[in-house]
Amino acid sequence: SKSGPVKKTSWQNRQGTRWSVEDGVLRGRPSSEEYQASRTHHYGYEPRVSVPVTPPEFLAGFSFRFVGGEETDIVPFIEFGHHVCRVKFSNKGTFVIVDHETLKVAESDEFKYAPGTWYHALAELKGDEFVIQFVDGPTWYVKHDCLAKANPSGGNGLGLAGPKDGTVELDNVSIWKIRSQVRRSWNKRRNLFDVMNPEPTGKEKKK
């Protein structure tokens, strides 16, 4: 990709964070000190971006890594729909939370967050079903009513948030709109996934 600023129609920087194409990847940095000083919330301490051109039902392949900074209870994560479905990375393991982060629906203690490591993912969202698989990592299947409901505010579509005071690098992004028809083999394939009983996270959903 050509170096320089990103097109806002394709990439929406969040919370004043700064994004540009550098060395062939999309790189995100936290907001400036001036921006942070001007805010009373949503300071942009961690780089955040969303892809508004993501179709409501999609297949997305992408590579990413989180560099520097520090992990918090909230970041780093990738998400699909603003507060709809998040994959939270932690040095204790990685997990999927949905419905404004109120329910944990998948997890892996073995798939631990490693700063600076490139992750390669393929994700699909259709109706109330979501599947994501990582190269050399887990494959998760999630079914929940909230997945079929877009958040009316915020950055929808594919999104990423990096570690606090760190950077994010994103590469090899391909996003497709998927067909309305479902393959006949899907019912059989679906039954092969291990499904976790949803666990409340303790967070209350905002009204």
Image: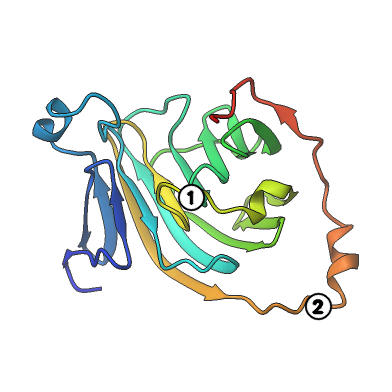
Q: Position of residue 85 (x, y in %)?
A: 58, 46
Q: CA distance from mark 2 to mark 1?
A: 30 Å
Q: Position of residue 104 (x, y in %)?
A: 68, 33
Determine the residue located farthest toward the left in the rendered image.
34
Q: Indicate the amino acid at tag 2.
A: Arg
The relative height of residue 137 versus residue 113 in the rendered view (above or below) is: below
Quadrant assignment for the N terminus = bottom left
Residue topped by disc 2: 183
Q: Nearer the viewer, residue 172 or 50?
A: 50
Residue 166 location, quadrant: top left
Q: Residues within 10 Å of mark 2 (few under 14, many from 20)?
A: few
Q: Position of residue 129 (x, y in %)?
A: 72, 57
In the rendered structure, find residue 152 and report the number of the disc placed on it: 1
* Residue at position x 55%, y 59% in the image: 121
The relative height of residue 76 versus residue 175 in the rendered view (above or below) is: above
Mark 1 residue element: loop
